[in-house]
Image: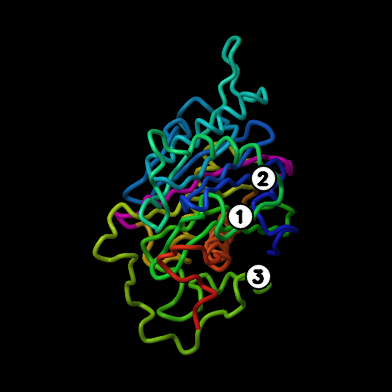
């Protein structure tokens, strides 16, 4: 496997990504816009999810395609971002046709970033609807990672989190890309070191090139949690795994399940009762390549590896901002 030309989820043909954020708020929104209706599913493994329109993504339900996916900060307030994205798409004439109406299908997931040093005194209505609208309008093939979009106010155990993305191209030409807002209760680094748990999957020193420590630190297996005494409901890693392979809805769900392996490889611990860990799966089919018995296992393994890399890249790319509660990875010695 090699990284795609951008090493972003937008290496998957048919997808664009837009960010919008409010620096004083220390929060933001990221929207993945599909150039055409795209096969989608979802897998939730965390115990505290916050979502919109995820039931329709189950393989046994009717709607096969989505027009966009929203990842947002703001906890339950952030679900408003999907309404903003939906408004922007409706203006563009995008959506599921029902009679004379078009209804943009925009599932969403949120993370908790309400207690991170930002000013949340927004008045009567939270700003996320407008952030979702602007992020959708900003969608392009290039976008910032780290302290950007839905990762603007993200935190992990001991370090700032962030928005991460990565891609991988398989030998058969299929591309897989990941996008993730890393706001985990657990840690992405090993003990108190700079080494990422995702180290074995790193390509071209994309998150520091440190590999795995040798010997492993004595505190490697210690469980470090974000704000241990007040960790409940202040977390969640939300993500999208996407491919240009031809997949049915059930295959997109299996891809989302496999991408959760990337969470487990990159965050210790993950999938806790206090995280809402969730992965959306998107299959654009743009390559025209269907999986075969000799490629299917590799495909789902690569999905997990690309997700692990995206998680590490999000934390690695975070930058300092006023009123931060935690340091960035770059501050570690």
Please give the count of numbered marks on the rendered protein. Answer: 3
Q: Nearer the viewer, residue 14 or 260?
A: 14
Q: Up-down: is 306 above or below 70? A: below
* Label whose residue precedes the other's in the sequence (3 or 2): 3
**C-alpha gap between disc 3 and disc 2:** 22 Å
Q: Is residue 223 left or right of residue 24?
A: left
Q: Up-down: is 220 above or below 18? A: below
Q: Position of residue 181 (x, y in %)?
A: 50, 54
Within 10 Å of disc 3 (Cα), the crowding (few <14, some 14-19, many 20+) is some
Picture quadrant of residue 168: bottom right
Within 10 Å of disc 1 (Cα), the crowding (few <14, some 14-19, many 20+) is many
Residue ID at (39%, 47%): 120
Q: Position of residue 113 (x, y in %)?
A: 40, 52
Task: State yes or no: discs 2 and 1 in contact (Cβ < 8 Å).
Answer: yes
Residue indicated by mark 2: 245
Residue ID at (38%, 33%): 124
């Amino acid at each position: 496997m090699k990284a795609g030309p951008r090493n972003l989820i937008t290496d998957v043909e048919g997808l664009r990504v837009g960010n919008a954020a409010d620096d004083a708020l220390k929060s933001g929104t990221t929207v993945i816009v599909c150039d055409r209706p795209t096969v989608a599913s979802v897998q939730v493994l965390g115990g505290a999810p916050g979502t919109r329109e995820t039931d329709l993504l189950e393989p046994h339900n009717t709607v096969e395609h989505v027009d966009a996916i929203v990842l947002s900060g703001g906890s339950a307030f952030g679900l408003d971002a999907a309404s903003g994205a939906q408004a922007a798409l409706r203006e563009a004439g995008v959506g599921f046709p029902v009679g004379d109406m078009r209804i943009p299908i925009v599932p969403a997931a949120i993370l908790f970033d309400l207690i991170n040093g930002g000013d949340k005194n927004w008045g009567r209505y939270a700003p996320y609807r407008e952030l979702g609208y602007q992020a959708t309008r900003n969608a392009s093939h290039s976008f910032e990672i780290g302290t950007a979009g839905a990762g603007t106010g993200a935190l992990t155990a001991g370090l700032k989190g962030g928005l991460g993305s990565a891609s991988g191209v398989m030998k058969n030409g299929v591309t897989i890309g990941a996008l993730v807002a890393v706001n985990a209760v657990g840690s992405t680094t090993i003990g108190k070191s700079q080494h990422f748990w995702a180290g074995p999957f790193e390509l071209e020193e994309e998150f520091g090139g440190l590999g795995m420590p040798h010997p492993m630190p004595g505190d490697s297996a210690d469980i470090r949690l974000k704000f241990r005494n007040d960790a409940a409901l202040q977390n969640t890693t939300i993500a999208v795994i996407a491919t240009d392979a031809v997949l049915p809805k059930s295959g997109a769900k299996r891809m989302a399940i496999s991408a959760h392996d990337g969470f487990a490889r990159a965050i210790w611990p993950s999938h806790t009762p206090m995280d809402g860990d969730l992965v959306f799966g998107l299959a654009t089919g743009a390559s025209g390549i269907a999986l075969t018995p000799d490629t299917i296992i590799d495909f789902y393994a690569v999905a997990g590896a690309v997700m692990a890399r995206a998680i590490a890249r999000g934390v690695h790319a975070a930058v300092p901002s006023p009123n931060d509660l935690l340091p960035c990875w770059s501050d570690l010695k």
